[in-house]
Amino acid sequence: MKIIVDADAAPRKVLEICHQAAAEYKIAVWTVASFNHNIVSDNHVIVGNSSQEADLRVMNMTAAGDVVVTQDYGLAAMVLGKGAAVLSPHGKVFREETINFLLEERDMKARFRRGGGRTRGPRKRTPEDDERFQKTLNDILLKLAKQCD
């Protein structure tokens, strides 16, 4: 079991929480980001800045029982299919039964924007987001650790 972070868009606080949780559970944290980002991590993979390059590396590194942190619905769908647990930096858990809806919603919004429409961007991160992420990550790690025993 390891934590893999799609670090291109992960807030610093999320990386910090992942490292704290990994130390507690005695597992590794792997971060993956393009060379445009300055990430401090013991296990960091630098990729080019081509579209989807970090996502492909995360997907290839993921195995069943891993925990992946990403806000990318497409990547979440792929690693769910590999048997990994997936959560967003806001603490939202991605599930097999809801990922198709999220992908369809993403596609509809993209078509709307291509047609000249405007959608809202992400809201500003709050301390509550950090607390939710930390609780959700700990819940997932505890559940996976119990399954390994």
Image: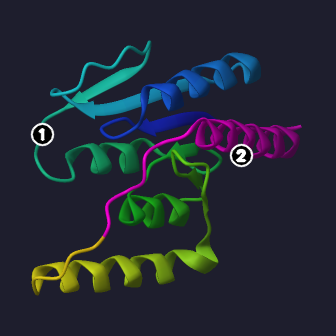
Query: Quick one: SS at disc 2?
Result: helix
Reply yes or no: does residue 37 show up in magenta: no
Disc 2 marks a residue whose amino acid type is Thr
Nearer the camera: disc 1 or disc 2: 2
Q: CA distance from mark 1 to mark 2?
A: 30 Å
The crowding category of the residue bearing disc 1, from other C-alpha atoms within 10 Å (few below 14, some 14 to 19, many at least 20), is some
Task: State the residue position of label 1.
Answer: 49
The x and y percentages for residue 49 are 12, 39
Earlier-in-chain disc, 1 versus 2 = 1
Q: Quadrant of the N terminus?
A: top right
Q: Residue at x 61, y 36 (%)?
A: 130
Task: State the residue position of label 2.
Answer: 136
Q: Residue at x 38, y 56 (%)?
A: 122
The x and y percentages for residue 17 are 60, 26
| Range drawn in magenta | 120-149
Query: Quick one: SS at disc 1?
Result: loop
Disc 1 marks a residue whose amino acid type is Asn
Q: Residue at x 28, y 73 (%)?
A: 119
